[in-house]
Image (cartoon, rainbow, N blue to C red):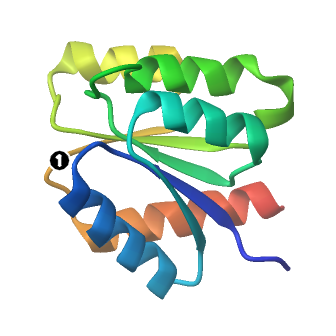
Amino acid sequence: MKQPRILIVDDEPNIVMSLEFLMRKNGYHVSIARNGTEALEAINQTAFNVILLDIMMPDVDGYQVCRHVRANPDRQETKVIFLSAKSKEADVQKGYEAGADLYIPKPFSTRQLVSKVQEMVATAAE
């Protein structure tokens, strides 16, 4: 089986670096988008298994990116995990309404995140 592809979308370099390291260490092929616009371009070009998506970004926010994925018939297999500091009930609700498969508030446990990504990749592969 080919390496699962993960897209990390976050405008915070430290988070991107640690997530990239974590995902590569667990055997994933990792792509990075530093804002929503880059994310949309990447999603249009490549089918990712899982997208780790921040919500608050300067240009296109995570909700818009997620809706874009859900509106694309070729990307229906893609799992979207929101990683956000916005942890109010309404924000979480909005994330699921935008089409998220999972919403994990920051700060999060990297172990929990890795296991969730593994679950999603396994489900998608079935």
Tag 1 residue: 106
Q: 44 left or right of 42?
A: right
Image quarter hosting the C terminus = bottom right
Who's the residue at 48% across and 17% down the image?
Answer: 64
Q: Position of residue 50 (x, y in %)?
A: 59, 52
Q: Position of residue 87 (x, y in %)?
A: 16, 30
**Badge 1: how crowded within 10 Å, few (<14), some, or many (20+)?**
few
- Specify whether residue 124 is in view: yes
Please count the marks in the image: 1
Q: Position of residue 6 (x, y in %)?
A: 58, 59
Who's the residue at 33% across and 45% down the image?
Answer: 10
Who's the residue at 37% across and 78% down the image?
Answer: 21
Who's the residue at 41% across and 19% down the image?
Answer: 60
Which of the 4 quarters of the picture holds residue 114?
Answer: bottom left
Which is nearer the eye, 37 or 111?
Answer: 37
Badge 1 element? loop
Which is nearer the eye, 11 or 120?
Answer: 11
Vertical placement of residue 22 versus 36, above or below: below
Q: 2 left or right of 56?
A: right
Q: Position of residue 93 (x, y in %)?
A: 34, 17
Vertical placement of residue 49 versus 55, above or below: below
- Specify whether residue 76 is in view: no
Image quarter hosting the N terminus = bottom right
Vertical placement of residue 29 versus 41, above or below: below
Which of the 4 quarters of the picture holds residue 91?
Answer: top left
Q: What residue type is labelled 1?
A: Lys
Q: 82 left or right of 69?
A: left
